[in-house]
Image (cartoon, coloured by chain):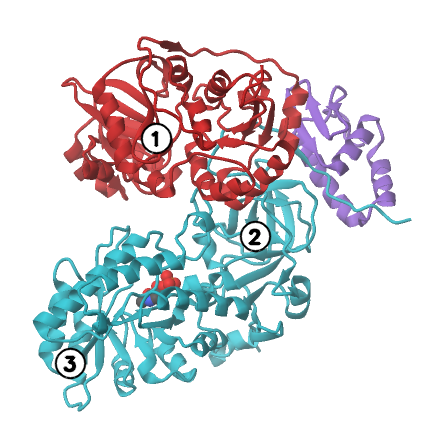
Amino acid sequence: MATRYTGLCIGVTGLNANDNPGPGIAVIRALKAGLGDDIRIVGFAYESLEPGIYMQGLVDKTYQLPYPTAGTGALLERLTYINNQEKLTAIIPNFDAELHNFIIIAPSLLKIGIRTFLPSLAQLQVRDKANLFEFGNKNGLPVPPHYKLFSAADLPHVTEELGFPLVIKGKFYDAYIAVNMDSALKAFKQLEAAWGYPVIAQKYIKGTEINVAALGSGNGSNLSIVPMRKLYITEKGKAWAGVTIEDNALVELADQFAKATQWRGAYELEIIRDAEDQLFIIEINPRFPAWIYLAAAAGQNQPAALIKMSMGENVTPFNSYETGKLFIRHSWDQVVDIAEFQKMSAFGEL
Amino acid sequence: MEKLPYERPYIKRLTPGAMNKFGSHSGAQPFKHIDGVQVTNLIAAYGSPLFVLSETQIRRNYRSAYRAFSTRYPKVQFAWSYKTNYLNAVCQIFHSEGSWAEVVSGFEYRKALGNGVAGNKIIFNGPSKSKEDLMLAIENDSLIHIDHLEELNLLITLSENLTDKPRVAIRVNMDTGIFPAWDRFGFNYENGEAWNALTKVVASGKLRLTGLHCHIGTYIQSTSAFGIAATKLADLALRCKTVLDQTIEYLDLGGGFPSMNTLKGAYLPGTDTLPSIDDFAEEICNKLINSDFAPNELPLLILESGRALIDDAGYLLGTVLANKRLADGKRATVVDFGVNILFTSFWYDHQISPAQDFSPHTENMAIYGPLCMNIDVIRENINLPLLNPGDHLVVHKVGAYNMTQWMQFITFRPAVVLIDERQNIHLIKAAETLDYIEENENVPGHLKAK
Amino acid sequence: MKIKKNIATSENGFVFNPATGDSFSGNAMASVILLAMKNGVNTAEIKADILKKYDVSVAQLDRDWEDWIIQLKEANLLELELNHGN
Ligand SMILES: Cc1ncc(COP(=O)(O)O)c(C=O)c1O
């Protein structure tokens, strides 16, 4: 049965459904659930082994994109080429590292008919790891104290202030929990070499890990907020199982964040609830989380709502979801012929 | 029978790798012309390697920077930072556009005089000015920017019996929220040193306090740092007026705007992440206009921009010497230009383009210079098409600092040509010769070749 | 110089080594040479054929051939030869 969404063509990145999964596959499932199975999904991949490339039921066609390091010129050129084949309706980028470029080219994409629903560069900046503490303080959001480290000589003073254990984070990725000076120094050296300055030292907060997936309207409110408590955490700190929960304090945090930033688009708050029931925001991701299909299954289909927003529809904010919905991630061995891998690798299309 | 075009046989392992910060895009396009002049012709006429400067681009850069500030602020003056590129032809382009000279040594000072710059349009910066340098600057009514107390004391002594007071400013360093803070030059704002120095200048009665100077660093990536600098200098100037009854005529915010090169280890290219000169101008001018100066008493705003005005007007042309496979199977290409003439390859991942058509296959490679030194690395990782010995390469955005910091090491320094606005080519510095390099040498008689 | 017998090449320039599981993609020249090698044409003949059809000097081809052999070794595509020679 055809709907108004039939034939929409939506580009999605983050097809790396591996042990540190990108959100792409979950986003696609939610889109199909929300907009109908008869939409066309175009996958965008950076690597030839991203599992989503080979999931024929979910991804109709995949194109390789240039790495973010290639810059906006190369990205726009590639997307223009792809658009000439596909006539894309909208794109949902799902990697932190690619957002900067997508935000810059969003107006050019719109000119060729491709919609996005993204935060501004300034919004992206304020929640950046390096700025989070100042941002939280300024807006009354609870953020654990942190320091920016520019040299190993900063460590003694900082560790005295924050105590052990403490979290040492790279400018872009990676985090280590340091239990003593030696491990702090080692982490600093590794992160400094990998990602440059600043390296960030954050106070370690012990407690329950909770994530909140939300969709900001762009004018200070949220269209959807779904909190999830992590039940099982992998060695990489990723949720392998989690359950939707209800807690007004969490919803209020998200509302406060949306108000402070006027956030437009998807985001995720990573929160820790300590023994005294206090909440701390330890990180804010500027995109959907990999568990976003749970939000859709619990009644708030954020990816579908985002597409509707990007198309200028009036979307009424969700006001309820089911608590006690559980997700359990599992792995699945996809089997394909080596020729498919070769084609993807060499031609950048499959 | 017409022969088919040949390409080196090449296979590439199809490896699935994790997304990492060293992107593997090719991005390379053949770059055959500079301002309409063919790269191969330039090399044929002037040799390889060869630096090429575009007069058109220099003037374009200057004009758009001047426009960015002058449309936002009533009184603006640029001073060409000599150390960035002091080839006389380059300096003259800037002077012809209206730039004063900013110099940091007696050598540069005399160069500016030689270029016909009026003494009162030379800004004399730097921690090392000799007594003779200072006397010359005083005689010429230049703007002397004091770096330390020793210099201040010397100036007071030198001015003892003068009728016209020398015009001076002090250089101020400060916390602008960036790392590292260049706190080794001038007097510190936060700890009150700057204020003490100002008081001392005024109390001496021998010097005319005319301006305030800062240069907060180079390749600054945030506009807010300049906003803070402008605010702090404005604050000092207003205090000079109210407390010391001294009108500060100009605020010199130094240089430091980035060129669009990409820093080593940066994740995204500079062209996508760096603020434009307009963004910097917006921040600086806003802060000054919204400070407590009366609108008709706004001081002159001086800028000493260097790299932002010339980096992208400079190219280095070179030639492939050899190809190698390293022990780990990775390809390396040896070229005829090294870090001795491309100093900035220590900081930047310079964009490099082949100067001729190529096939679509690319390979990840290291690019090494011709020196017998392990540090002679132009790019550790770059994806380029298959290159053959004799192929030409163009390195982009090399106009700043390379033609002043280059080293004469192992071989000669190359020629520099300028392409003018009518596409005429001018040799503005000839390549070095053995005679030139040995000119000042002296071999004692007993060591002379028999 | 012999290429391993079970190497699978496709006209797209793909190479698959079923013994190791490695995949490669080659340029047009690589495909031409691989095909000839698989068909047992010897080095001298392959080179002569290239010189006849393609715009390349003997010196350049010799130089590139050395690099080609290094690439094949690196890629584990060569038959180990006990008696040295062609
Ligand atoms: C005092 C002074 N002014 C101006 C400059 C030019 O700086 P930039 O090339 O970063 O604009 C420098 C360079 O170090 C400097 O020391």
Q: Above or below — where is B174 with respect to A252?
A: below
Chain C on-screen colour:
purple
Q: Quadrant of the C terminus of chain A?
A: top right
Q: Quadrant of ligand 1?
A: bottom left
The residue that mark 3 highlights is B156
Neighbourhood count class around disc 3 (C-alpha, 10 Å): few under 14, some 14–19, many 20 upward? some
- Separation (CA) of disc 3 from disc 2: 52 Å
The kind of residue tagged 3 is Ile
Neighbourhood count class around disc 1 (C-alpha, 10 Å): few under 14, some 14–19, many 20 upward? many
Chain letter of disc 1 in the image? A
The residue that mark 2 highlights is B352
Numbered disc 3: secondary structure: helix
Q: Position of residue A268 (x, y in %)?
A: 34, 26
Task: Give the chain coloured cyan.
Answer: B
Q: Position of residue B137 (x, y in %)?
A: 28, 83
The residue that mark 1 highlights is A216
Q: Above or below — where is B393 with respect to B165?
A: above
Which quadrant holds residue B223?
Answer: bottom left
Q: Nearer the viewer, mark 3 or mark 1?
A: 1
Residue B222 appears in view: yes
Query: Could you tell me which residue is drawn at 47 percent across and 47 percent down?
Result: B269
The kind of residue tagged 1 is Gly
Numbered disc 1: secondary structure: strand
Numbered disc 2: secondary structure: strand
Chain A on-screen colour:
red
